[in-house]
Amino acid sequence: MMETIYRKILIPTDGSESTNGAIGYAIDLARQTGAEITALSVKDITNYATIPGEPDVESPLYQVCEAAVRGVVQAAAEQGVRAEGMVVSGIPKRDIVEVSMEHDLVVMGTAGRTGVPHLLLGSVADKVIRHARSPVIVVRAGGALSFKCERMLIATDGSDSSAPAISHGLKLAKAFGADVTALSVSDTGGGMVGSAEDRARMADAAVNGVAEEGRRLGVTVEPQVIAGSPADVIVEMSGQHDLLVMGTHGRSGLAHFRLGSVAEKAIRNARCPVMVVKAGLNA
């Protein structure tokens, strides 16, 4: 059994099929690491006259939430994973963030490309990714149902805000004996500050810093600097890896992600699950 820093995993669920991949992924991760799971479903009171925290257990909406968490708990039990269910009446984007304070990791699903405006880029997932008190792994609908970490991709631009993501990623890689690719993209787009040579030097310094930290932990890191469009390169490279790790500033709005539209596109289109680690989180 692998030892990681993630001992309590939160799975937000609404019972939809788009969360199945995340549920299976989180349960398998918990099985491999001995972590415990909390399945959380929030009965949204935004458009209903309901007292927060006091669910109407007879309402159809509550029954849907209860069935959702019960399904996760049962699936976990079948894998020998300890799990509990939690149903609350409230505001999903607020309550998921609050419950994340008591957990080491959040694993959540998305609807993939077609449903992105309503889920991944909607107010719930957007706020969870930006404000959760723990790293968030996003698993797109139709993605992996099991956890695998043999090859990890860490995207970095060398900024201080990427340090927590690098630290979390390398520690997880160490636990699973994964090989790591440290990727920095030398942006060839117009309007960039500095010369192409300066941007390339900064990219080299960024990936070499990850490699140095990896050496201290005993993790094999392959530095790669590629010229091109950052979002496109990261998405393309993600297809060769089991997990993409990225950092954010955690400020309001996806426009303020550390990589801005780059992170947005990477999360939406990555070909593997994505771990997002907000700046300021300790590893």
Image: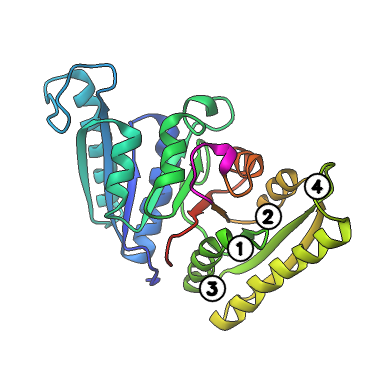
Q: Local crowd at mark 4 within 10 Å, few (<14), some, or many (≥20)?
A: few
Q: Which mark is residue 177?
A: 3
| Residue 253 falls within the magenta-colored stretch | yes
Q: Which image quarter is the C terminus in?
A: bottom left
Q: Find the magenta span and give its range.
A: 249-256
Disc 3 to disc 2, C-alpha distance: 17 Å
* Image disc number at residue 240: 2
- Using the numbered discs, state the Cα–Cα distance from disc 3 to disc 1 in whole angstroms: 9 Å
Question: Mark 3 or mark 1, which has the lower sequence index?
Answer: 1
Q: Which mark is residue 151?
A: 1
Residue at (32, 63) in percent of width and height = 7
The answer to whether 255 appears left or right of 111 in the picture is right
What element does badge 4 sit on? Answer: loop
Q: Which residue is mark 4?
A: 192
Q: Earlier in the sequence, mark 3 or mark 4?
A: 3
Report whether 178 appears left or right of 99: right
Disc 3 to disc 4, C-alpha distance: 37 Å
Tag 2's secondary structure? loop
**Secondary structure of residue under mark 1:** strand
Tell me the kind of residue under disc 4: Met
The alpha-carbon separation of the residues under discs 2 and 1 comes to 8 Å
Amino acid type, callout 2: Gln
| 2 or 4: tag closer to the N-terminus | 4
**Residue 250 visible in the picture:** yes
Residue 184 bears which disc, if any?
Answer: none
Secondary structure beneath label 3: loop
Tell me whether the residue at label 2 lies in contact with that at label 4, contact meaning CB atoms closer than 8 angstroms: no
